[in-house]
Image: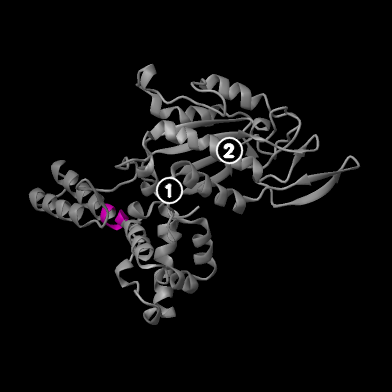
Amino acid sequence: MYITITPQNLGKNFSKSSAGYVEYLEKENQGLEQEDMEHFFNQHGYEISAEEVVREIDGNTAKLEKHEPRFYSITVNPSPRELKRLENGSEDLKRYTRELMKEYVKCFNREINGRPITVDDIKYFAKIEHQRTFKGTDIQVRENQPYATKILKLKQEVRKIQRGEAKGNIERLKLKIGKLEKQAPYQQNGKRIVQGMQKAGNQGHIHIIVSRKDASNRYSLSPGSKHKASEVVLNGEKVKRGFDRDAFFERAEKAFDRTFKYERNYVETYLSRKQFIKDPKLYFNIVTGLPTNQRAMAFKILRESKMPMFPQIPTNKVQLALKTIKQLKRGVDVAIKSSSIGI
């Protein structure tokens, strides 16, 4: 499970309208018949139009300044293993979204009229997407780039020869190009992975637009708060504030596990990612100390994450040298960020 929470901004100021972001989320519906489209939904409604989403989010920004975000984007990316657990892709993801947003509100250190906030106190809209494309920042594209540069140079040579600007053997150059295409380390369906290529397999994920203001348009609820829990005096009254991201990420996992009876391995947990960042040596000690079946699954999950140098990971505590861990740290960090084994 990989989850991000980000404010939507343009330059130094935040977007005045959600229209651009909503339009972006409609991209997969282009060219589809009405019955094949994925529509926006929220806690109590389905098939909500893009126009209604923009109207509701943009109309819920009372007293917000230019430097304050009008809304936040929450993106939820289940791992391939988690997606396999679903029996009815879109409907299951919608069901999970509603459970997730119940957990979301529990992570605010806020009260409304003396009571904890509930999911009915927030204004949000969500949408399921099924496609993803490779970005320039993806490890597959970055590590294929040296080959892409050489291929581009050879293709330029071919074009010069074809235009009569240079002399050379076009067929020989094309053979070199074909060889480089196959040598690129990251391939998909027999083709070199490039920026913009659609990712294969089940790519189901969730986009959530949540208003900065509560449903009454009176109270500010920011998941971007720097505080987990604190109190401040406003207009002579003590007001609770804060949002606990750690708690939200952990609750997100538990909600998924509870909803779909999913048995989460240690390396899939938010706790394990934090442990890896804090102390990679202890992280690998924990992984190698797992019961046999869980350890085997942990290694399988990490291996499927395309972690560089994975075969060199030692399989017992005696072999677990700090030097080896340092060599692996960069590779594991990339795997955690580029796959879905962390939040």
Residue 173 among magenta residues: no
On the image, the x and y values in percent for residue 210 come to 60, 34
Q: Mark 2 or mark 1, which is nearer to you?
A: 1
**Toward the viewer: 5 or 149?**
5
In three-dimensional space, the C-alpha distance between marks 2 and 1, rounded to whole angstroms, equals: 19 Å
Neighbours of disc 2 within 10 Å: few (<14), some (14-19), many (20+): many
**Toward the viewer: 9 or 105?**
105
The image quadrant of residue 105 is top right
Residue 25 falls left or right of residue 292:
right
Q: Is residue 328 above or below residue 88?
A: below
The image quadrant of residue 333 is bottom left
Element at label 2? helix
Pointer 2 or 1: first along the chain = 2
Magenta span: chief secondary structure: helix
- State how the image is colored: one colour
Residue 145 among magenta residues: yes
Q: Is residue 272 above or below residue 173?
A: below
Q: Which residues are magenta?
A: 144-148
Q: Which residue is mark 1?
A: 262
Q: Amino acid at mark 2?
A: Met
Residue 326 falls left or right of residue 45:
left
Q: Which residue is mark 2?
A: 101
- Total marks shown come to 2
Q: Are marks 2 and 1 in contact (CB under 8 Å)?
A: no
The image quadrant of residue 114 is top right
On the image, the x and y values in percent for residue 246 come to 60, 54
Name the residue at the top extreme: 34
Note whether residue 73 is visible: no
Neighbours of disc 1 within 10 Å: few (<14), some (14-19), many (20+): some
On the image, the x and y values in percent for residue 310 come to 33, 67
